[in-house]
Image (cartoon, coloured by chain):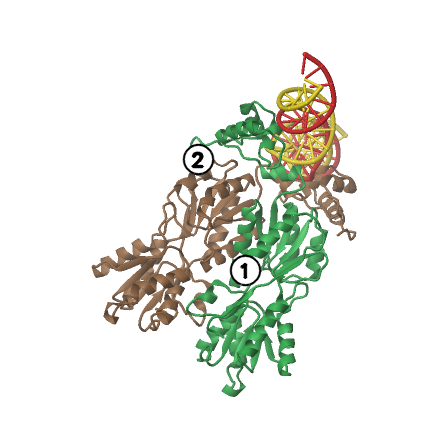
Chain colours: A brown, B green, C yellow, D red
DNA sequence: AAATATCTTGCACGCGCGGGCAAAACCGAT
DNA sequence: ATCGGTTTTGCCCGCGCGTGCAAGATATTT
């Protein structure tokens, strides 16, 4: 372990001594917008380099009010889109100097403690990519010490203490509905995910409304307890296994791709039918697998990278005025519908 | 925002005043193995509760030498198994009081800076779930300040400064080879992932050796540049598209499920063949999709949860003696081979 | 050249907690 | 009540850096 590498913690004081300046000048040299002359800075940086010094972010966070750390809470590892969001988010954050505390709240009872835990780490913001949280959790969040911002990513929320960054579900779903109508489908089944209290998706409601406006009847819908392809496959199978061809929907409109992938699997392998000939499927998110030769899923793509960048903008501009924002994606037409 | 919730940071001093004890007693009350009388502790805890106090982990890390924070580096978000590992790891860590700093090192040049960054946060250990790192990165790691432990998860490493926790690739691959031989397959194609310098998988080498020992010839093999189903599908398609049935392999043995899923997709939808009738496929990892009705993939399951728990054991027992360990999984036979 | 404006540097103090030891409180036994 | 032993509590010092201001250095103006 001690292969000549600097074992001892080298602090700003050491660098200061080496560079012949004060400790504060050393720390200033590492701050982008600090007032310091270029020559002093480069002299300090050289000394720092040779001593292997880097500022201690923990001490920095303790002394100041910002940690450049955000907590990301995620409770659903079965949905491949979560991985995509996690990847984009961590990339956007890291590129702009933010670190990510990943908190697994798979256990719903753990959501409130997890939020508390994040606040113990002085995170500058808490980002929710999950859904299994209710108002009580939100309230707990705002009680936590050092609590700064609560951002709900890729999901809407009316809570005024919360910042929501998501796609315009209503516009997106109207586009989907128009596509389904234009293509002449006549018997849609809407496949929805779990319903939650605090963070919502207006997709199902919007689709149902749009359909009624055009066709005058309420489309059938069922819901799955989690965004899990395996669960979705089961529910779809249960719903359709005993139907005659005439009773079958001609398209399954899914709240997201996780459900859509499961639906396709079960249509083919459980019901022995063809997609899209017997039943078409349309998703939401555009996960990587949607493009695979196996699925070729028609789906609505969310601009996650843009959304992630906006999130970092928010972190950097501390004004607390209304920061909610919705984005527009676009329908990616493939072969499943 | 100021809805009556305690906006001011409440510190141990406040609780001390409220409970009529010293600050140190307050902090002691929050330490599991501290020497403190039960009644004092409960009195302190009550006061803490009513004030909404929780210890500040940042300050604690600064004052002591442990942060109870680990960095998890991940560079491959296309492989669904990564998500599984991330889930298990964060769960095991969180259950035992550890927090996770998630570092996205998708950009290979960012690996060394990322490691440095982790050390700036005083992490107690750095865990690599990725693969795109080479010896240079490892060396950089050991130079970083506050550097504690470097753990390579689910991948072997001979580096003496590193702790490797992984499945016994050799035993696992021998089991797979035995299965392939017993089932009477005669023309395997080994589909390998990218080759790296510092962290390795002995799967391909072991399979080739085992096959030669039994059949006396070297099986064909190709490699894919990333553990990405889409890329895998392309490579398999390129490799097999112009072959006559006689020239085709009768089984594709894959280094992991990410490759296997892509292989199945392309066998069906690119080559128009059947799995396992025309070409069988066998994977490694047992990702959730492997069990889906679509894939029914025969694959080797790694005991990730056990491995994750062992990892936390290591974090808690600080002895630096040889901590490497391999685990045994088991072959999950489904219908793809 | 003197005076003013501007930039750069140094410093006292504090962020909240932990290690380790000394003082205090407690226990049972004489 | 007294004593030795044991548990419990209090506290000094330091972890490494940021804030905000004042002093020092440099540049600009007339």
Up-down: is A270 above or below A228?
below
Residue A224 appears left or right of A78? left
Crowd tier of the residue under label 2, counting other residues whose Cα lies within 10 Å: few below 14, some 14–19, many 20 or above: few
Q: Which is in the foreground here, disc 1 or disc 2?
A: 1
The residue lying at 47 percent from left, 75 percent from top is: B266
Q: Secondary structure at mark 1?
A: helix
Q: Residue at x 72, y 41 (%)?
A: A11
Q: Earlier in the sequence, mark 1 or mark 2?
A: 2
The CA span between labels 1 and 2 is: 38 Å
Residue identifier under label 2: B1
Residue A258 in picture, x, y percent from top left: 41, 61
Instruction: Please tell me the numbered disc located at residue A167.
Output: none
Picture quadrant where residue D26 is located: top right
Residue B104, can we see it?
A: no
Coordinates of residue B41 in the picture (x, y in percent): 56, 30
Q: Regarding mark 2 in the picture, which secondary structure is present there?
A: loop
């Amino acid at each position: 372990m001690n292969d000549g590498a600097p074992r001892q913690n080298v602090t700003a004081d050491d660098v200061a001594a080496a560079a012949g300046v004060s400790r504060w000048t050393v720390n200033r040299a590492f701050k982008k917008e600090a007032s310091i002359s270029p020559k002093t800075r480069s002299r300090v940086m050289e000394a720092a380099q040779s001593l292997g010094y880097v500022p201690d972010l923990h001490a920095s966070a303790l002394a100041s009010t910002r940690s450049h750390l955000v907590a990301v809470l995620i409770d659903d590892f079965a949905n491949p889109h979560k991985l995509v969001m996690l990847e984009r988010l961590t990339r956007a954050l890291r590129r702009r100097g933010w670190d990510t505390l990943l908190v697994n709240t798979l256990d719903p009872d753990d959501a409130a403690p997890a939020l508390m835990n994040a606040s113990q780490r002085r995170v500058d913001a808490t980002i929710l990519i999950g859904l299994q949280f209710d108002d009580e959790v939100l309230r707990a969040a705002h009680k936590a010490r050092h609590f700064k911002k609560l951002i709900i990513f890729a999901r809407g929320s009316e809570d005024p203490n919360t910042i929501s960054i998501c796609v315009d579900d209503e516009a997106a779903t109207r586009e989907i509905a128009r596509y389904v109508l234009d293509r002449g489908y006549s018997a849609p089944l809407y496949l929805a995910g779990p319903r939650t209290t605090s963070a919502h998706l207006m997709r199902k409601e919007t689709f149902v409304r749009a359909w009624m406006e055009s066709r005058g009847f309420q489309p059938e819908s069922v819901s799955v307890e989690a965004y899990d392809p395996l669960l979705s496959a089961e529910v779809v199978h249960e719903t359709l296994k005993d139907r005659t061809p005439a009773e079958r929907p001609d398209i399954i409109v899914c709240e997201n791709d996780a459900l859509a992938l499961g639906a396709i699997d079960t249509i083919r392998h459980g019901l022995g039918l063809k997609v899209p000939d017997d039943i078409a499927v349309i998703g939401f998110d555009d996960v990587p697998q949607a493009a695979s030769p196996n699925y070729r899923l028609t789906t609505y793509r969310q601009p996650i990278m843009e959304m992630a960048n906006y999130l970092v903008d928010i972190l950097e501009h501390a004004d607390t005025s209304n920061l909610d924002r919705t984005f527009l994606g676009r329908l990616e037409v493939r072969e499943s519908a």
